[in-house]
Each structure stands twice: as structure tokens, then as C-alpha cells.
Image (tube, rainbow, N blue to C red):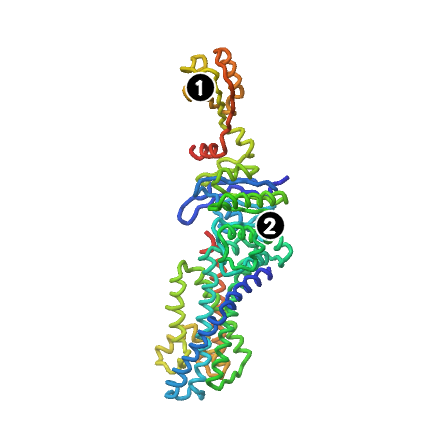
Amino acid sequence: MNWLSAQTIFMAEMNRFFRTIGQSLISPVISTVLYFVVFGAAIGKQINHIEGISYGAFIVPGLIMLALLTQSVSNASFGIYFPRFSGTIYEYLAAPISALEMIVGFVGAAAAKSIIIGLVILATSWFFVPLEIRHPFWMIAFLLLTAITFSLLGFIIGLWADGFEKLQIIPLLIITPLTFLGGSFYSIKVLPPFWHTLSLFNPVVYLVSGFRWSFNEVADVNIAWSLGATGLFLVLCLGIVTWIFKTGYRLKN
Amino acid sequence: MPSVISVQNLSKTYASGLKALDDVSLEIERGEILALLGPNGAGKTTLISIICGIVTKSSGSVTVDGHDNVTDFRAARKLIGLVPQELHLSIFETVWDTVAFSRNLYGRETNAAYLEELLKKLSLWDKKDQKIMALSGGMKRRLLIAKALAHEPRILFLDEPTAGVDVALRQDLWNVVRALRDTGVTIILTTHYIEEAEDLADRVGVINQGKLILIEDKKALMRKMGQKRLTLELAKPLAKLPKALARNGLALLDGGRELHYSYDVRSSKDSIAKLLADLAKANVTFNDLHTEQSSLEDIFLGLVKQ
């Protein structure tokens, strides 16, 4: 493992984030505030407490997850797609670095960015609802695991895409619906049995549920299931990335 | 001395079915400047891309200083710097940052003194804090060379370094290349500017349709393959060529005032002597004579047309 090379990629990616820190942070903060205004203040008042917590407090973990998933995917896919698009990828391919170092650099940076955004959203929500985090360790663990897993997924999308449209299409067609239907804004327990069962095939359900449990011990599925499903998805993404580097798919002709 | 890069039976067929390289074997000697010539699409870029690890080979092997470039890629690639054909740069970064990035990416800590010297050598030092987007095309070209040299490689690949570069800058780049060679760096450049190879290279390889059709010492190549032309300015114009002189390659020109004799140095070592003897016998006298040797360009075109 060549740490200096991995760190170099990581820092170069982070610098890109910090160069536009205003834009990077202002939009997630504004959209979070909007969600609170709409779901928390306007609609939320009409909604009864869910398992003993106010609707405002209930959606906080979902909102953070929503941002974490979309940001991880978009940061990582753009991070690796852009050098491919601009041609600067040649330098990474010709450098004495392995797939592992590239992944640590690119995926690590994408995950770090989305975690920063997730924490900023957490801080913003503190202004709107009283929050308690009963299991800070597990909260951080889910944050890390989710950010890394979905950054890997974004990395795969960024390698697969051969145009800016494709870069958008998976987040738009898959990630966003899965997140909205994954219990970010409701408990899947309230769904009719068929939709409830179907929801259990949605990996986002396990992420949101586990993450919410770490806040207030309210969960749609058992915490062990949450951890297991997230871990499984992580291993799956790692497998695909390893295959990509082994075969050179879309990286090398 | 063993060669610094050894390419054995290298072939490459792209997914599209295009056979870009066909059983190429090549030994690159330590410290030489090797020019790879070839028309567009001949396989030059594919060859150096495979050596540098950017393109995967279909078959064959490449070793760099004894290290296989796939199984021992770290050791192999550390020795190599690559200047790509296109101006691939992150335009939002500063000159200094991008050069330091290149060095660190290769696993070497920033060495401010070395990088300063490098940027000065390439006349980029006063631009070090500028963003790349503010640089001119020529500066970007030099910056790519600086990036390729940032990790102090022992082998430098230049893929058409002077494509679209003005004459003055081309001379600057050639001086940089010569200075590098003097420090012991092996240089491989691809080009279709024949004069570039003629001016710079120690050896010349010609690639056409994926095959290395020739690799030779430049001077030997030009000597061996060169057509020479002898021009004689006759003392008295001739109405027509006397029969006694008639032979292949001899022509009367300029209204009978000049005799042009084209000959191949390889095939006939004494053809000039014979011609001069025949001229004396036929009482044809001349005031002056000179010879011209064909350029690498003529040789190259001759080879590629075959």
C-alpha cells in the first residue's frame, strides 16, 4: 500500500470540494430547511407522533440518509468520471499505484465530503427539533458504512458512464426513488402487507432503519439485519470495483 | 549493456476488432533517444500506452529495467514519465499544485528545490501560482513535460510533443530533450515530423499498420538506405546524352547544362567512379559537382509506401 499516493488523490479531491465549499454546503442546508418547513412545520403538525417521537424528529435520520446517499453517489461518480472525460485519467493509470490506492483516494474523498454534508444537516436540524442520539457509536458507524458503500456505488457509476447523462440517470431513476420509498419520511410499518414486504427488498430501508435506531431506538427492521444488509451491499460494491480494475473495464482499452 | 525496455512479441487488438499492434519486438537502449515514426493510426501511441500501463496488451510482454510492466508494475512505472499527446490538464489547479501532485502521486514527497529547478528549466517558474487555464498552449505543453518529470523518471515518453507547436517553442523543447538525454534519461518520442527525428534521435523506428517495419541507427539508416544524387555542371551544354554514358538514373537537365545522376549507395559502391571514367572517355568536362543525400523523410515515405 502506497499511502502517499492514496493521500495525494484524497487531498486533490478534497481541495476541489473546499474550492467550492459555499456551493457544496449551501444547497444541502437549504434543502434540509425546506424539508423541515414543509414536512416538519406545515404537514408535520397534522401527523401524530410516530412511536412516541414527533414527526420532525422522526424524519431527521431520513433526511441525513437522503443527503448522504445522493451526495455519496454524485460526488464519487463525478470524481472519477471527470478525469475520464477530461483525459487527465492517464496520469492515474500510468502512476505506480494499485486499484486499492485509487479507491481509497477517490472513494474515501467522496465519502468524507458526504459525511461532512451529513453532519452539517444534523447540525441544521438541531435548530428545528430537539434531538437525542442514544447510540452515537452506531450512528457514526452507519454514517461511515453508508457513505463508503454508496461512494463505491457512485464510483462504479462514474466508471460505467460514458456521458454526463448516464451520470445522472442512475441517481435519478434508482437512488432517489429507493430513498423516498425507503422509509426516509415514514415508517414502512404503516404500509399494507404487500408494500411492506416489497419494501424489505429495498436496501435503503435497512440503512435508514439502522440509522434511525441509533438516534431514538425506533426501527423498521432489526438492527442486526440493518448492519448485515449494509455490509452485504458494501461487499457487493467492492466486488464489482475489484472486477473493474482487474479487467480494466472502461478504464483501459 | 542490457536494454532498458524490452518489448517481446507485443500484439494488441482493440474491442472494435482493430489490430493496432502486430507482433512488435523492440529493445530500447539505455540513454538513447529513439524516435518512432509512422503515419497517423500506425500504432505508435498504442505501443507507448501499453508500455506505460494505460492500455492493456492482447499478448506479448514488456519489461522495464528487468521489471515486468504488469506483474511488477510499481517498479516498472516508477522509472517512467509520460507526456501525452493531448493537453490533458486539470485547468482549475495552479502550476505548482499540479506538479507537486504528479510527484506525490508517484509516491515521492514534495521536493521544493527539485520542482523549482524543473519549472525554471521549462520557463514556467514565474507562472507557478497561476491557474492552468490562464496558460498558453505552449506553456501547457511544457507543463505536461514538467509533470512527467516531477518524479525524476529515468525514461521519458513523449507522444508527439511538438504537434501544433510553433517553431521557436519546438526548438526550446528539443533543447530540453537533449539536456535530459545528457543527464542519462532514455527518451522515446513519437512524431510525424521527420525533421524532429532527424535532428534529435540516435535511432529511428518506423511503425506502419501495427508492425515495426524497421529500427536502425539513424546515421546508418540514412547511409544505408539513402538515395544520393550527383549533380554535374557541364562546361559545355550537351544536345543529348551520349550513348556511351547511358545508364539508369542518369538524366540531362537544364537545357543540357546539368547532368543529374541518382544512385543508391547500398547497391553500387563504385557507380560514381564508373560514371566519371565514362565521362572522361566521352570527353565530357564539367565545372562543378555536388551531391545531395535523401532526407529521412524520403526514406520514410519510401518505406511506408511499400
Occupied quadrant, residue A57: bottom left
Amino acid of disc 1: Arg
Judge by depth and name the residue closer to the eye, A188 or B82: B82
**Upstream in the sequence, badge 1 or badge 2?**
2
Question: Is residue B187 something one can see in this rendering?
Answer: yes
Question: What is the secondary structure assignment of the residue under circle 1?
Answer: loop
Q: Residues within 10 Å of mark 2 (few under 14, many from 20)?
A: some
Q: Is residue B208 above or below residue B265?
A: below
Residue for point 44% across, 71% down: A70
Residue at the spot of label 2: B121
Q: Is residue A62 above or below residue B266?
A: below
Q: Is residue A105 above or below residue B156?
A: below
Residue B257's label in the rendered image is 1
Residue for point 49% across, 30% down: B294
- Subunit of mark 1? B
The mark lying in front, picked from 1 and 2, is 1
